[in-house]
Every structure is written in C-alpha cells, then in structure tokens.
Image (tube, grey):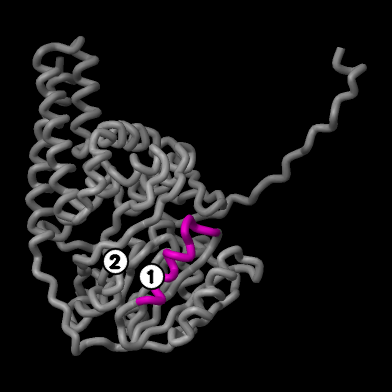
Amino acid sequence: MYLEAFISLIIFVSWVYWIVALVSTWAFSRQKEEVDPTFSPPVSVLKPIKGFDYEAYLNLKSFFTQDYPQYEILFGVETPDEPTLPVIKRLKEEHPQIPVKVIIAEPQSANRKAGMLEILSQHASYPILIASDSDFRAPPDYLKRVVSPLKKPEIGLVTCFYRGKETLTVAAKVEAIYMSTNLLPSASIGLRWMKMGYAFGSTIALRRETLEEVGGFRAFADYLADDHEAGARVRATGKLVYLSRCIVDTVLGPVRWRELWSRQLRWMRCVLVSRPLLYPEILLTFSIPLSLILSFLTDFSFFSRALLLLSLGLRLLVGWLTLGFMDYKEMRKNILLLPLADLFQFALWVWAPFGRRIVWRGEEYKLRRDGRLERVEKRRRRIPLPIPRWRRR
C-alpha cells in the first residue's frame, strides 16, 4: 500500500519534471544567438584519436571546412599505426590551407583522452582552445558560434549539445532517440534554473589562460568525467559555462546492443561518481518504467493503467516537441522507440551502483568513489590444449 502510494507520488513529480523540461527546452530554442563577426581570434582545435570511428573521413572533414578565418587542427594519436592516420593524411592533402599537426605520444594518465588533450594543448599555437571528440561532425559555422560567446569576459567555457545521427541499427536508433529527447531537456533545466557547471565532450571551448587557471587538462586527467570536471572547475573560478545553440552530430553507425549497454553503463556510472546528488534525481525521468512497475504491483488496476497511459502520452509528446525544438524532425519517425529507450536506461540506472568497472575504447577501468580511474591490467588467458580423441571418452 505505502509502496504503491510512493511510486504514484514519484510519477506525479515526474510529470511536473517533464513539463518544466519542455518549457526550458522551448526557452532554450528561442534564445537569441549573437555571433559577432568582428570577434574571430585564431583557434586551435584539439582532436584526440583512438580507433577508427564510423565515417571518420566525413567527421574529421567537417572540421577542415569551417567558415572561420584562422585556425589549426591538432590530432593526437598514441601509436604510428593508428588506423585513422591515413584519413588525416588524405584530409591534409585535400585542404593544404589548414595548418595541421599530428602528435604521436602516449599519455601517462588514467584518462588517456584528457592526457592527450594536455599534450596537444602544449603544442597549440593560438589563445583559444577547442577540444572535441573524434566521432562528432560539426556544421560549417561551428567555430564562429562556439568562439563568439568567449568575447564576454564572464564566460569561461562554451559547450555544445549533440544529437545522434547515422543510426543504422535498432540499438543506434534507441540511443539516438534517448540522447535527443532526454539530455537536452536536462541540460536546459540546468541552464535556466541553476548555474550550469558542467560541459559535454562534444565541445570544450575556452581561453588558454582560463585553462591554465584551473590547472590545465592534467588537473583532471585521472577522472572519468573529464568534461564534467572541466565545467565544474571553470565554474569554481567564478566564470560561467555557456551552452551554445550550436548542435553537433555524434555519428553512431551500426551500434550493437552490447556496445550500447557498455557505453551507457559507463555514462551512468560516470554520473554516479561525478554528481552523486544528481543520481537519485534521474529517477524522475522514468515515468514510463515507474508506471509499468505500479501496474504490475496493483495487478493492472484502472488507476495504474490510467497513469501508464498518461505517462506514455506525456513522454511521447515532450519527446516529439523536443525533436522539433532541436531541428531534428527526421528522428520523429522513431518516436515509438522512446518507451523502449526509457526502459533500457532504467535497467542501467538500477544496475550501475552494483559495480565500479567500465570499458572505454577497448580498455577496462575501475572507478574510485571520487571519480578517478584505475586501469585494469589485462590478464593473460591460458589457452586450453586440444584434447586427444582417445581422452574424450
């Protein structure tokens, strides 16, 4: 009885959350974006590379074709046989007007991406640094839009939201629909109602002096949530974190369910250790799973069925409108996958606290309680010798 009442209360609060999230997303989409054409300082784009991303050529090419007067691109790889190097070489030949540096170095930090960013920042020539993951594709005006807010001295860091593109499998579509209808509303609430103090790995744009003020990328090179740490440390200096209206595409490709589980489990455990007070609040996003649980507990009573239908209707409506606000109407054809995405994420939310291990770019790590990473050394597996036929009897 008390459990059913508690779950019902959480469902009602969840509805309020989604209404507030919808209003905040609408307000964000209406926000006027000021791009000052007279403010275009030279920029260094930092790109850590590891492994071969789906459509790597087109992803990286989008950074070679920016409508911006002066910038350089720095690629960081760990080994000379990195599979993306031929793609970088081809792009250099096709766009000789763009200065390119390829740095081959092995980061010594636990978070190898953040460690590589520290190495790249030391080789960067310009006063504005923009770090971006390798699997993102940017629009031609990306640099203009993320650099322009830095004209204001009170803004210390600019970041961008992202949406999933090139979804070739059902798992990729599930990831994209959840990403596009959940993360932006959550971020817009943080932007509108709270002083946003985190960033997204899609974009971390900041002045060199701001980066040095927070200790450089090396200051959080052992943390899993390097983007969160960057935003939080910049915010701690008194400067603001600015969420740009520019939305970039993360190219998903043929994602498999196992890959999706591993990646989203890493993200969920990342939230658990980096923002532990926020973790219980994620429950408010699960109105559909909670309504389904209530229906099972009450043997699908009329009341629980009504709550389930209302939760479904509200969630689908908010998702549909959010996709319109972020100019991603083509994803609406997959809107009916949204309940499945919520159930998948709810299972991850329940499972995440029961372990500390994650897999990231083929490497296994253990998470400390403070958010730092410990690399798990791979053990050599003993290969069983073939058993002769006469021993099998």
Q: Position of residue 112 (x, y in %)?
A: 52, 64
Question: Where residue 370 sits in the image (x, y, percent)?
Answer: 40, 54
Q: What residue lies at 43% left-to-right and 39% top-to-bottom?
A: 261
Secondary structure category for the residue under label 2: helix
Q: Nearer the viewer, residue 385 or 85?
A: 85
192 is within the stretch colored magenta: no
Percent x, y for residue 92? 51, 79
Q: Is residue 109 above or below residue 205?
A: above
Position of 250 with respect to 3 (left or right) is right
In depth, the one of 199 and 85 nearer the eye is 85
Q: Residue at x 14, y 11 (%)?
A: 301
Residue at x-position 16% and y-position 63%: 195
Given residues 335 and 128, the one toward you in this image is 335
Numbered tag placed on residue 231 in the rendering: 2
Q: Residues within 10 Å of mark 1 (few under 14, many from 20)?
A: some
| Residue 82, numbered circle | none
Is 56 placed above or below 7 here?
below
Tell me the kind of residue under disc 2. Gly
Q: Is residue 69 visible?
A: yes
Residue corresponding to mark 1: 62
Look at 55% across and 59% down and name the residue there: 51
Count up the numbered dots: 2
Provide residue 259's location: percent of width, then percent of height: 48, 43
User: For numbered disc 1, what is the local secondary structure?
Assistant: helix
Query: Is residue 218 visible to the viewer in this orientation of the structure?
Result: no
Query: Marks 1 and 2: CB-CB under 8 Å?
Result: no
Q: Give the residues in magenta.
A: 52-65
